[in-house]
Image (cartoon, grey):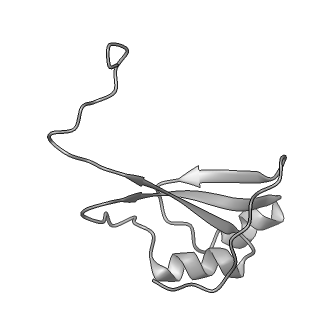
Amino acid sequence: MTLPGHVFSAPDGVRGFDTDERVTAAARDFRARGYRFCVRYVRRDKPHASSLSTNEARSLLAAGIGIMLVQYVESETSTPPSVAFK
């Protein structure tokens, strides 16, 4: 997926939000409320129905919302986090 834009560091105090659900029509509402970036969680292997799409990414960028991605893995062999995990 190739998207228009630039890579920037977010200065201290810039408001953002995170979600694992699609944000499309609401992107302009988030911008109007002072949010400037969105952290989206994406799977490494099999995409979910709510995975980031090209249309969603373009909608966020067009609204003036930057995108940060966090990759996560769901696996039957992964170790679930716990207090005892070291």
Pinpoint residue 30: horizontal percent, then vertical percent.
73, 62
Looking at the image, residue 79 sits to the left or right of residue 69; the answer is left
Q: How many marks?
A: 0
The quadrant holding residue 29 is: bottom right
Nearer to me, 46 or 9: 9
| Residue at the (69%, 61%) spot, across then down | 37
Which quadrant of the figure contains the C terminus? top left
Image position, residue 47 (x, y; %): 30, 66
Q: Can you name the residue that lies furthest to the left here?
A: 76
Residue 84 placement (x, y as % from top left): 32, 13
* Left or right placement of residue 24 versus residue 54 in this view: right
Vertical relation: 3 (above or below) 30:
below
Residue 22 placed where, x, y %? Answer: 49, 65
Quadrant in the picture for the N terminus: bottom left
Name the one closer to the observer, 22 or 66: 66
Q: Is residue 33 left or right of residue 85?
A: right
Residue at x-position 58% and y-position 73%? 24
Residue at 67%, 70% in the rendered image: 27
Q: Residue at x 68, y 68 (%)?
A: 66
**83 vs 61, nearest the viewer:** 83
Q: Quadrant of residue 83?
A: top left
Please say if 4 is above or below 33. below
Q: Residue lying farthest top?
A: 84
